[in-house]
Image (spheres, helix red, strand yellow):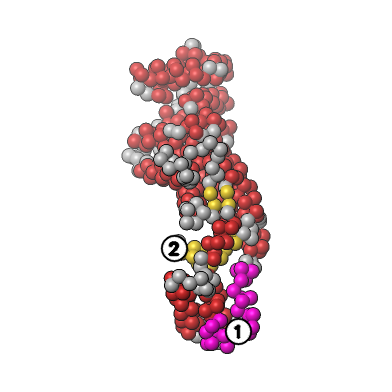
Amino acid sequence: MITRYSRPEMRTIWTDENKLKIWLQIELLASEALVKEGVVPAKDFKKIKAGCDKWFADLPGLVARQRELEKTLNHDVIGFTTAVAEAINDNASRWFHFGLTSSDIGDTAFAVQMTQSADILIADVKTLLPVIARRAKEHKFTPCIGRSHGIHGEPTTFGLKMALMHDEFGRALRRLESAKYTVSVGKLSGAVGTSAHLSPRVEAYVCKKLGLRPAPIATQVVQRDIHAEFQTTLALVAASIERWAVEFRHLQRTEVLEAEEAFTVGQKGSSAMPHKRNPITWERLTGLARVIRGNAMASLENVALWHERDISHSSVERIIFPDSCTLLDYMFGLLTRLMDGLVVYPANMKKNLGLSLGMWNSQTVLLALIKKGLTREAAYKICQDAAMKTWEVKHAGRDDANFVEQLQADPTVAKHFKKGELEKLCSLDFHFKEVNNRFKKLGL
């Protein structure tokens, strides 16, 4: 894991100390519920609680003892229950883990860890969104060329690009909130999920105290399509990060240079070429998104288990869930920093816009000619011919290549437009007349 790069809060969630702390909470709540059920004597519960409190106060000690016992027992939950029984040090320990199976504890704790992680990731998006919104408003009317297939299309604004990004991460926020709800499911229904040895009231009590919903039905485990939904959500959110990483990597290319990753004082770009300023952090985000996608694929493989349960999913989940959560948290931190410090070059955007030689007006003129009464085919031919002539002039090395001037020189075109009409039509104002409305619709 790259846990050293993520926030301490996220790293803490996936530590053994936090896991065993949640295990203790679940066991204690189950015993408390059994007192209410009249199964566990109140005096024995006090002894159970005292033993648990000892380990609550010394979680590193509990982890160490559990690991030591697991070496012999080859079972993590039994190592845990044995360590707690030692702390209880009384016949009352017979009630500890009463009617439960290992997955009751493990899966319910797992749900708590996922919801805790989801809370941090949700907070990450809420931190990112205002930064994107600020950059969008800053460049609301900064003109740049829009590209399709990597080729100049029509003008847009850099602010609209940022507004699009803001909208996408609004969806990421909703997806993470939905994923949190999906995984907020616990179960204490026994070895094959029949609740034969423990009343469903105990399950309901424990889950409510932990902020979870009881699984409506389960086997020995909570069904893994639930966990796969969480992982695929993380992968989809990471894909959104990658989508913008790729965008800004293209915009930083020397031939484009419309936006650039901030290059800090003292930073080096290349061991061989001192002039380089590379989009290394955007590239890092691109690569890490691939890791999370791979983890999502592993989670899909975990859905199909043998009958009421096998343990093939367990080893996978111990890797992919801490890794994916800490990775995505780290990625959000990077993304927020990058967007906050993104260097934007409006002058280069204007220069690049000029490389199209005014041909970004072709659809505008096409539609205007159709309105004038020409067929689409005739109007299309006029515009395409003018565009091809513009390219020929440009490729001949002349400096007077201009799409609008080529149209004006065509008598077939000139007769359809009043003086100054074509020039007014072929303007940035024409393309940006709905920008304010778009921002208003997005709440920016």
Residues in magenta, as a range: 408-431
Q: Identify the element where label 1 is drawn.
A: loop
Q: Name the residue located 45 percent from the left edge and 30 percent from the top edge.
A: 106
Q: Name the residue located 54 percent from the left edge and 55 percent from the top edge.
A: 258
Where does residue 403 sit, x and y in percent of width and height?
A: 52, 75
Mark positioned earlier in the residue sequence (1 or 2)? 2
Front residue of this view, candidates 197 and 218: 218
Q: Is residue 127 visible?
A: yes
Q: What amino acid is found at the position of numbered circle 2 in the picture?
A: His
Q: Residue furthest top?
A: 89
Would you identify the image quadrant in which residue 35 lies? top right
Q: Is residue 395 above or below residue 50?
A: below
Is 20 contained in the magenta span? no
Residue at the disc numbered 1: 417
Q: Is residue 428 above or below residue 442?
A: below
Which dot, 1 or 2, sits closer to the camera? 1
Q: Identify the element where label 2 is drawn.
A: loop
Crowding at label 1, few (<14), some or many (≥20) Cα neighbours within 10 Å? some
Q: What amino acid is found at the position of numbered circle 1 in the picture?
A: Phe
Would you identify the image quadrant in which residue 431 lies? bottom right
Cα distance between the residues tagged 1 and 2? 32 Å
Where does residue 29 sit, x and y in percent of width and height?
A: 55, 26
Labels 1 & 2 near each other (Cβ < 8 A): no
Residue at the disc numbered 2: 149
Where does residue 204 sit, x and y in percent of width and height?
A: 54, 35
Report the quarter where the N terminus lies: top left
Where does residue 49 sit, x and y in percent of width and height?
A: 55, 18
Q: Is residue 196 visible?
A: no
Left or right: 4 in relation to 122: left
